[in-house]
Amino acid sequence: MSSFDSILLPLDGSLQAAKAVPSALWLAERLHATLHVLHAAPHPLAPANALERLSALAAQRSRTVLHQTKVDPVQAVLEATKQHHVKLVVITARGESASRDVERGRTLGRIARALVVESSVPVLLVPLHDRSVLPWRSMLVAASGDPESDGALAAAARLASALDLRVTVVHVIAEPGSGGLGGYADAAYHELPWRLEEMVKRALLSSSPEDVGRIEGLAVRRGDPITEVIAEVEQRRSSVVAVGWHGDLSPEHANVLLGLLERAAFPLLVVRKPPPPEFRLKVGDEIGPRPDSTEGDHV
Amino acid sequence: MTVAPDRREAPFRAAQGSIAWQVEAEGFDPAREHAIESMFAVGNGYLGVRHVLPLPGAWGDLFVAGVYDRKDEGLAYSELEFLAPERGDSVHVQLEPLPYPLHASVRVEGELLAIPGANARAMRRRLDLRCAVVEVEGVHETEGGRRTRLSSLHCASLADPHVLLQQVTAAAENHWGTIEITSSLFDPVEAHRDPPVVVLEHIRSGDLELIRYATHASGYEVCIAARAFTREDGRDAVVYRRVLAVFTNRDVQDPRAAALARIEQLAADAFDALLGDHERAWREFWEDADIRVDGSPATEQALRFTMYHLRIAVDRDPGASIPGRAFTGRAYEGHVFWDTEIFMLPFYLYTAPPLARNLLRYRRHTLDGARARARSLGYAGACFAWESTVTGEDVTPTRIILKTTRQEIPIFTGTQQVHVTADIAYAVWRYWEATHDEAFLAGEGADLLFETARFWASRVTRDERGYHIRQVVGPDEYHHDVDDNAYTNWMARFNLERAAWLAGSLGSAARPRLGADEPSRWQEVAAGLCCAGPDDRGVIEQFAGFHALEDYRLSPQERFKAPVSRLFHWDKVNRLKLIKQPDVLMLLMLFPEAFPRDVVAANYRYYEPLTDHGSSLSAPVHAATAVRLGLYEDAERYWKQSLWFDLSNRMQNSDLGIHPAAMGGVWQALVFGWLGVRFTSDGPQVDAAPAVRLPAQWRAVALKLAWRGRTYPVARSAEMPGGPP
């Protein structure tokens, strides 16, 4: 059994939301996971035909569990990830609102947005224009060079290993003004391709050899990050793209993610930046001041 | 009842005192792990082992002094991105990284316990500086709540440099599962590491294990034998101890026999005795070398960390010296630089003089290589290589190739950075001054002084103004093909003068080693050598034409970075007033009596703003100079940057090893900067000038310095004239 042994599939009954079902089912089967189907609505569905009503009849299998609740959907989803020790959430970028063709300008629905912003669990976002094909063959990880990429890469490698997928890591050198994925504090000395290789090694330092072995290649592109990632996907025929995520959905910080969701025809695995590792080197300030002093020794 | 302040603070101070004897890391951060591997390395000058956790990506290397091999083209040179492929036919280019020998596994009911890992809790690691032991502890908790406490320690014996000691303890906290501890000298998963040494033999027999390696081209053989002892400690704990013996065919004819003999005779309780010997040897070292900084345990800790690494970098083998990153990492391929004589040697000279002598004997040992090099360049005497290993041949790369882009960067230091020859002579002289080791000076010292003087006398060119040394690189490596570099010329002049003096002093004893009129020739060249002095501003021109270079505005963001882009634009940088590290300021530090304060001040004001500190050697020199000038804000800033250089991974390149030369510079900045120590016929004297004050938190500093066969206590308190304002 892989470490992704519990998958959450929120469904609101819309056809749009149900587009996540095939991916969720495939993942649950391949990962030997329990599939938690969650429906939050004021009026629960009759259990006997709930999955059919949710356009998820195919999910009826021995390791599927249906949860219905009257609690607010956002609250329900967030609680479910904790309650059921969920390791992966599969959801469409928009559900009912897309089906009803409302709020057209929104890339992310309310529930998907809440998951991406507030949950620490990786979220597989199935975009509005998803044309992905199952089974997945390969994964592309978009590495910005920021620390968020580390978490995405390690999680992607772990998932890829469990699914027997090839992984390629791509970094896009953003052209000035194109809204790149990240800046470099050491820009004067930044040797990007080397950094990419070392960043990958650092991110996978505590990964198993099997996970590390999934990384097949490193690619560097130059241009608009959204366009280049899509181009790389098309070139490699990647099935899914993993991105590291810092949790801020404001346009100035999330333009690449939102842009990919709008334009991409493939699912996005969004991996939240892990909490800073618990590490403390007891030198300098860490040794502490004298009890009657106002300041300690500063490194 | 009130408690007197002293009694109230006593427990706190006691706790801080013990904290200042250790560096502790809690938890795990992948981004910092490789630097931790370097910082927590153990060694004894004969060998060094990085401290690694059982992780697939760990850089676990064992280095043995003097064991070099042909260059492996895939191995990085100074930074991970930098390759330096060709080095001709030399088979002594890179210090061979050998496989990590301290693998250990703990299993409970067959399940491998991994720390770090998802089930690891409360992991801490401690480098005990007093005993030079690395300890690791943590708890492994399974999903079902079964808790096992794990702890380990290991060290490289200072008492017996061929011995490594390792202990692993596993104790069940709340279960009765069977605990099994195993170890290995070799991990087959690592077998494809680069460069793979040749495994000649690997056997296990009962509690014995043996492995033999061979280098590919240089003909060295390394043998490691290990013996394990297991005992149960109560019902629920297992203690596993291992003694490893490391020998090479550099030490003995049959390293296999020697390694086996070393461990086969061990009794089950030998471990405690060996550990005790090791701890005793370190106590003796600290007895002479320790520095107390009352009021600043953080400074004490950092200084002890510095001295710990300096001590584990050196042994008594005259056939090897200190690699650029000691035995803690692969950077610079284990090459020996001027770092040893100018930055590190003073520490040994004034705390453990026999070790300083040994470092100079290494240069005597490689004198033939330096002679051959001089001849090949068309000069007389000995021209020491900028980078050398065990033979003295030049192993400096001529170019760096960037791994990913294949861009080439030319390296000029090998052919032009000749000041190392004079640096060695300078170190010989300072050694003699500090020890009055007449036998050394008359023998090996004279060999070095005479041959290096001979080189300078042949290296100079003459015109109507006098003698010149052209087309060199000074300590500032951003500028090449320069003429009359002030540092090089002054050091060469010192070299010539001392050689001439020694020739006269030895009289007839020296004559067989000298050509006709050589000493007078050396004096003539020294007298006529163009050594720039202070101009009307008090500034000494770094080299001929430096003042006419194009101005460059240096931003704060560009400082303290590994100078990658400078190397990309080497041609343009060569035309700028931008320097990598102290050049003229080095001179002022090495000859403090020769330059009055106003000259030091003028040159500091001129050159400090032009320095981007692209070398770890830069900050300590600036700290020492700034103290001398009373520029305390600068002094404290540079002092802190250098003191915690590796502990903070300042230049983000401690992954490939710590910076021992910078550490030597820190020690000098303390002794010759903050304390202003000068040596007289009465021993070391602290500068108690009213203008000099200690950093605010320091109440007092105390240490010992060796001088001419005696050890002197040296102390300075904040209450002395010149204490805190």
Image: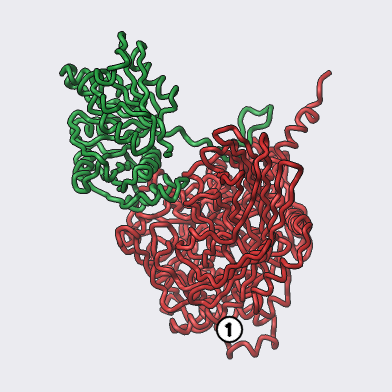
Residue located at (51% from left, 49% from top): B55
Q: Specify whether residue B596 is in view.
A: no
**Residue B92, how many percent across, how many down?**
50, 74
- Chain A shade in the render: green
Q: What is the residue that sits farthest to the top in this orientation?
A: A42
Identify the subunit bearing mark 1: B
Residue located at (30% from left, 61% from top): B407
**Residue B259, how many percent across, how many down?**
67, 70
Residue located at (31% from left, 26% from top): A60
Q: The chain coloured red carries which letter?
A: B
Bin the neighbour count of mark 1 within 10 Å (Cα to Cα): few under 14, some 14-19, many 20 and up. some
Residue B280 found in image quarter:
bottom right
Quadrant into which the N terminus of chain B falls = top right
Front residue of B56/A188: it is B56
Q: Is residue A83 above or below residue B301?
A: above
Residue A137 found in image quarter:
top left
Q: On the rendered structure, is B368 left or right of B355?
A: left
Q: On the rendered structure, is B124 left or right of B440?
A: left
Q: Amino acid at mark 1?
A: Ser
**Residue B140, how many percent across, how many down?**
59, 39
Asked which secondary structure carries label 1, the reply is helix
Q: Is residue B390 above or below residue B610?
A: below
